Amino acid sequence: MQFTEAKMGRIFIIRLHDGERIPDVLEGFAENQQIKSALCFFLGGAKENSRVVVGPKDGNFLPPEPMSTLLKGVHEACGVGTIFRNEEGTPKLHMHAAFGRQQETITGCVRLGVDVWQIGEVIIFELTDTEAKRAVDKKTGFEFLEVR
């Protein structure tokens, strides 16, 4: 385990509109607001054909080959994630979300693009006084969080 401390910075309350795409809109917002580190929560709707990463095809194979699925129909959604700068200094969102429709739920990573249906609410809690960042792990290809 590795850990570091941080302090709470600004808190942003964001309304996303129909068709805005996560993670693009949140990473762009973080860039514009000069957010280096943050915790974020998403609540709203997801459009049909949004693409979600739902796991590796084989957990024993490295680098992992991701599996993805398209949402069929509009889904209710809630997610939690973090934003940290990568090695190039670009804000990168890592968010997992649950998408529900009737009695079925799909849970996965939003990195391939989830389009908001009608409304999305996001709260971003900026974290300050930390040097945590994302760095590419050569073995897996993932951008892991590094803390000092």
Image (cartoon, rainbow, N blue to C red):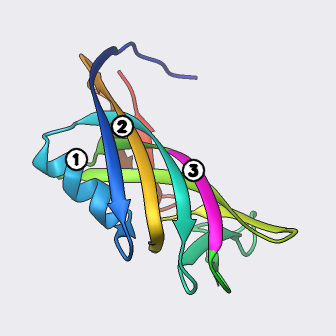
On the image, numbered disc 2 is attached to which residue? 124
Give the prevailing secondary structure in the magenta stretch: strand
Residue 127 figure quarter: top left
Q: Is residue 76 left or right of residue 59?
A: left
Q: Residue pushed farthest right?
A: 103
Local packing at callout 3 (Cα closer than 10 Å; few below 14, some 14-19, many 20+) is some
Q: Position of residue 39 (x, y in %)?
A: 42, 34
Q: Give the amino acid type for the residue marked by disc 1 in the picture.
A: Ala
User: Which quarter of the rendering shows the N terminus?
Assistant: top right
Task: Determine whether the residue tagged by mark 3 lies in a helix, strand or loop.
Answer: strand
Foreground: 97 or 56? 97
What range is drawn magenta here? Answer: 75-80
User: Which quarter of the rendering shows the C terminus?
Assistant: top left
Q: Residue pushed farthest front?
A: 118
Foreground: 19 or 64? 19
On the image, numbered disc 1 is attached to which residue? 30
Residue 82 figure quarter: top left
Q: Give the amino acid type for the residue marked by disc 2 in the picture.
A: Ile
Marks 2,3: beta carbons within 8 A: no
Marks 1,3: beta carbons within 8 A: no
- Identify the mark nearer the N-term, 1 or 2: 1
What's the CA distance linking mark 2 and mark 3? 12 Å
Q: Is residue 14 left or right of residue 31?
A: right
Marks 1,2: beta carbons within 8 A: yes
**Closer to the observer: label 1 or label 2?**
2
